[in-house]
Amino acid sequence: MTEPPQPARDRLRAEAVSLGYDNRLVTDDLTVSIPDGSFTVIVGPNACGKSTLLRGLARLLAPRHGTVYLDGRSIQSLRSKEVARRLGLLPQGSHAPDGITVADLVARGRYPHQRLLRQWSADDERVVAQAMVDTRVDDLADRLVDELSGGQRQRVWLAMVLAQQTPILLLDEPTTYLDIAHQVEVLDLCAGLHRDGRTLVAVLHDLNQACRYATHLVAMRGGSLVAQGDPREIVDAHLVEEVFGLACRVIDDPETGTPLVIPAASRHRIG
């Protein structure tokens, strides 16, 4: 029996979901809606459930209770290729097969569009080439992925996700292990994808980066939602202390006007 579609709402949302691993419950009765066309960033302290929520939204983790909806239907009811044509995922700590070139890895993003009677086409070739241009890895096409720097590899993985041509992109800690210059490079690239019309959902550890790039912020603690909304409207010293347990001042970023968190100075200085 076909599941009746839900009333029109945001394309991706979780309603009263409980998520966990084995006997450990991480989130309980969590409801989050991802605004269409937003650059949503999920923040919170370690082990608060950020990546667990993203895995639930990506259908990598089935809810014990509640439902994740994609385009008005339970994401669990959709076929894998159908999900992959609507939603792209850049997981944490991606690993490429040994000996694979950049072009071959990016081409794997076209897999959801392959069918028995529709194999590799000139259109696939065009999409892969454009994805490499958009992420500035086209000059690396013939290089082996395992020879690249961390920042280059991350851009290659983004190119593969772009090649899926999905309207929604989920990014799990895309700046982890990158130096500050490469972090900014990757986030600038993500911001460009958002400006081009895609809905992005990212997990970030750096609250200041989240405030600078996000149009919608989801703040979590202990598996629960603490606040969500425009960073300019919800981020203040009280929220930072409630979520992270950090005493601070929040000022306007002199470059962007977005919230900038300044931790309170320690009373016990060395030297």
Image (tube, rainbow, N blue to C red):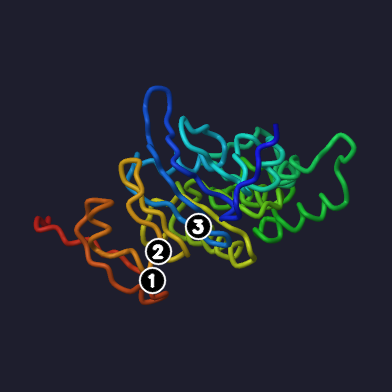
Q: Earlier in the sequence, mark 3 or mark 2?
A: 3
Query: Residue 121, percent across and down?
Result: 87, 47
Depth check: 80 or 9 in front? Answer: 9
Which mark is in front, 3 or 1? 1
Assign a secondary structure to mark 1: loop
Vertical comparison of 232 with 88: above or below: below
Distance from the alpha carbon under mark 3 to that under mark 1:
21 Å
**Residue of label 2:** 211
Q: Residue furthest top?
A: 23
**Residue of label 3:** 182
**Residue of label 1:** 258
Mark number displayed over residue 160: none
Crowding at mark 1 (Cα within 10 Å: few <14, some 14-19, many 20+): many
Assign a secondary structure to mark 3: helix
Query: Residue 218, percent across and down?
Result: 41, 54
CB atoms at circles 3 and 2 under 8 Å apart? no
Residue 225 shows up from this direction: yes
Using residue 131 as the reference point, say whether residue 21 is left or right of it.
Answer: left
Type of the residue with mark 3 = His
Type of the residue with mark 2 = Cys
Residue 101 shows up from this direction: no
Crowding at mark 2 (Cα within 10 Å: few <14, some 14-19, many 20+): many
Query: Residue 152, percent across and down?
Result: 59, 52
Distance from the alpha carbon under mark 1 to that under mark 2:
6 Å
Using residue 257 as the reference point, say whether residue 8 is left or right of it.
Answer: right
Distance from the alpha carbon under mark 3 to that under mark 2:
18 Å
Query: Residue 167, percent across and down?
Result: 65, 55
Using residue 133 as the reference point, say whether residue 250 is left or right of it.
Answer: left
Q: Residue at x 56, y 39 (%)?
A: 94
CB atoms at circles 1 and 2 under 8 Å apart? yes
- Tell me where residue 266 sits by quadrant: bottom left
| Image quadrant in which the N terminus is located | top right
